[in-house]
């Protein structure tokens, strides 16, 4: 076999084919990143809403069981949720604090401090807890005067 016939039978990719594949992958990645970020934000607000609901329920149960002969409450702030022992967050016994992380991209508003009464477990305040993301996605939890919680959308 001669050298020119060997060159014509070689298998492989041209630089143009490689550039087209890289461009196609880049376009797909560019289109999928905003979708991924949207799912991530929605997941963050859903997880935070669940943590708030679970914290409220835990504080209510601790108050109903009169754990430590005290009332228990929940304080919600940007970045964290604190279950505390005492009549209010400012005068709490911080050695009993249970702190849970919440995404810093979520801003809580509405009722941010709820204290449950001993035995009955009724909240000292009722209303909406509103969690808002940086992209204006909102999740609202409503707690009524008997301590029932529900998601409002």
Image: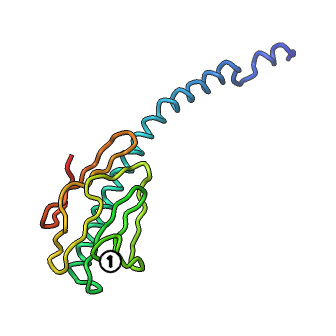
Q: Is residue 19 above or below residue 32?
A: above
Which residue is pictured at 27% across the width and 75% down the height?
87
Q: Position of residue 46 (x, y in %)?
A: 33, 52
Q: Which residue carries the number 1 mark?
A: 85
- Asked whether, in this view, residue 20 is left or right of residue 112, the answer is right
In terms of secondary structure, where does tag 1 sit?
strand
Residue 93 visible somewhere in the drawing: yes
Q: Position of residue 125 (x, y in %)?
A: 19, 64
Q: Position of residue 150 (x, y in %)?
A: 19, 57
Name the image quarter holding residue 129. bottom left
Please tell me which residue lies in front, 85 or 2.
85
Please tell me which residue lies in front, 122 or 51.
122
The extreme bottom residue here reads 69
Which residue is pictured at 32% across the width and 77% down the height?
85
The extreme left residue here reads 146
Q: Is residue 98 above or below residue 129?
A: below
Q: Quadrant of the N terminus?
A: top right
Q: Position of residue 39 (x, y in %)?
A: 39, 43
């Amino acid at each position: 076999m001669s050298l020119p016939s060997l060159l014509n039978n070689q298998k492989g990719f041209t630089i143009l084919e490689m550039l087209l594949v890289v461009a196609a992958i880049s376009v797909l990645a560019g289109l999928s990143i905003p979708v991924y970020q949207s799912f991530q934000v929605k997941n963050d607000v859903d997880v935070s809403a669940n943590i708030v609901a679970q914290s409220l329920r835990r504080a209510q149960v601790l108050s109903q069981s009169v754990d430590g002969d005290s009332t228990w409450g929940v304080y919600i702030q940007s970045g964290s949720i604190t279950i505390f022992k005492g009549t209010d967050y400012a005068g709490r016994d911080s050695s009993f604090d249970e702190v849970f992380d919440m995404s810093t991209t979520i801003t809580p508003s509405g009722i941010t401090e709820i204290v449950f009464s001993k035995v009955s477990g009724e909240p000292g305040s009722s209303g909406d807890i509103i969690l808002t993301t940086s992209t204006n996605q909102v999740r609202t939890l409503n707690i009524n005067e008997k301590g029932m919680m529900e998601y409002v959308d």
